[in-house]
Amino acid sequence: MPVSRLLNRVVLAAYRWAEHQGAVRPGTDLADEFGAFGHASLLGHPWATLYGQSKMHIGSGTLIGKWCALAVGYGPEDHHAPDRGLVIGDRCVIGARSTITAHGSITIGDDVWFGQSVFVSDSGHGYQDPETPIGVQLDHFHPVSIGSGSWIGHGAIILPGATIGRNVVVGAGSVVRGEVPDHTIVAGVPARVVRRLVPGKGWVSASKPDDVKPAWTAAEVAALYADEG
C-alpha cells in the first residue's frame, strides 16, 4: 500500500475520532457549563464560536450542527449578559454553519429546524453619529422569537425584533423582520407572506387566491405514501 494512502486513512480516521469525541453532549465538561443542556442533545465538533454558554438553555433531543457560532453577550467576559439570552427548545435541528448571537433574548421553540448557514441576531449597530465608526455604535437589543414547528430555510437571515409564529416556513435566502403570523410561508428580501393557511380551504397563495394547496394531516400524508408504496 502506498504511504500516501496509508497516511490519508490515518488522518481521516483521526479526524472522525476527534469529531465524535469532541462533540458536546450531556455528561461532558462543556455541557455542564451551559445553563441547561438537555437529554440526547448534541453540539457538533468543531464549532466556529462558542461563548456565554452559561446563559444558553438547550432542550432535549436537539442537534446543533458543526461549524455553528453560538454567542450570548458582547464577548466571553461580558458579565452583563442576560441569564436566558439564548433558549432553544426540544427536538430542534440547527444546521451546520449557522450563527445565533444573542445580546438580550433569542427564543426558539420546540421542533424548529434550520437549514444550513442561517443567521439570527437580536442586535445590530447604529449609524447616527457620523464621526464614530459604525462598528462601535452598539444598538439596543430587540428580542427575537421563532415559534414551535417552524422551518427556516438555507441561508435565511432573521433580523433583530423578528417574531416568527408557529409552523412557519421561511424560504431559503429570505431576510425576515417584523412579525410573521402562524401557519404562513414567507420568502424574499424582505420576506413577505406568499402563502397562508385558510381553515377549511387550504394553503392559499397571497398573489393568486385561486391557487390553493391542500392541507393534509400527518396521518393523511403517511397513508398517501403507503398507497404509493
Image (cartoon, grey):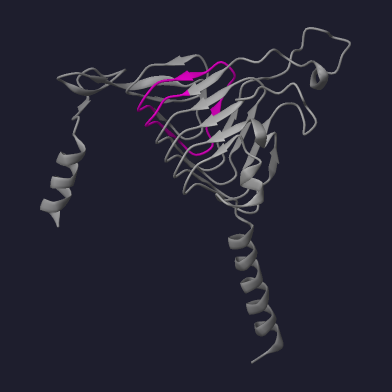
Q: Residue furthest top?
A: 128
With respect to residue 130, does 195 lie above or below? below
Q: Position of residue 102 (x, y in %)?
A: 64, 26
Residue closest to the eye, 121 or 190:
121
At x 44%, y 45%, the residue is 61
Residue closest to the eye, 176 or 94:
94
Q: Position of residue 121 (x, y in %)?
A: 62, 26
The verdict on residue 154 being magenta is yes
Q: Main secondary structure of the magenta part?
A: loop
Q: Quadrant of residue 212?
A: top left
Q: Position of residue 200 (x, y in %)?
A: 14, 19
Q: Quadrant of residue 101?
A: top right
At x 41%, y 33%, the residue is 110
Q: Residue furthest bottom?
A: 1
Residue closest to the eye, 134 or 104:
104
At x 18%, y 46%, the residue is 222
Quadrant that contains the N terminus: bottom right
Quadrant that contains the C terminus: bottom left
At x 87%, y 14%, the residue is 132
With respect to residue 176, does 223 lie above or below? below
Is residue 157 found left or right of 91 in the rendered image? right
Q: Quadrant of residue 45?
A: bottom right
The verdict on residue 148 being magenta is yes
With respect to residue 133, does 220 lie above or below? below
Q: Position of residue 127 (x, y in %)?
A: 76, 12
Residue stretch rendered in magenta on the structure: 146-168
Is residue 200 found left or right of 192 in the rendered image? left
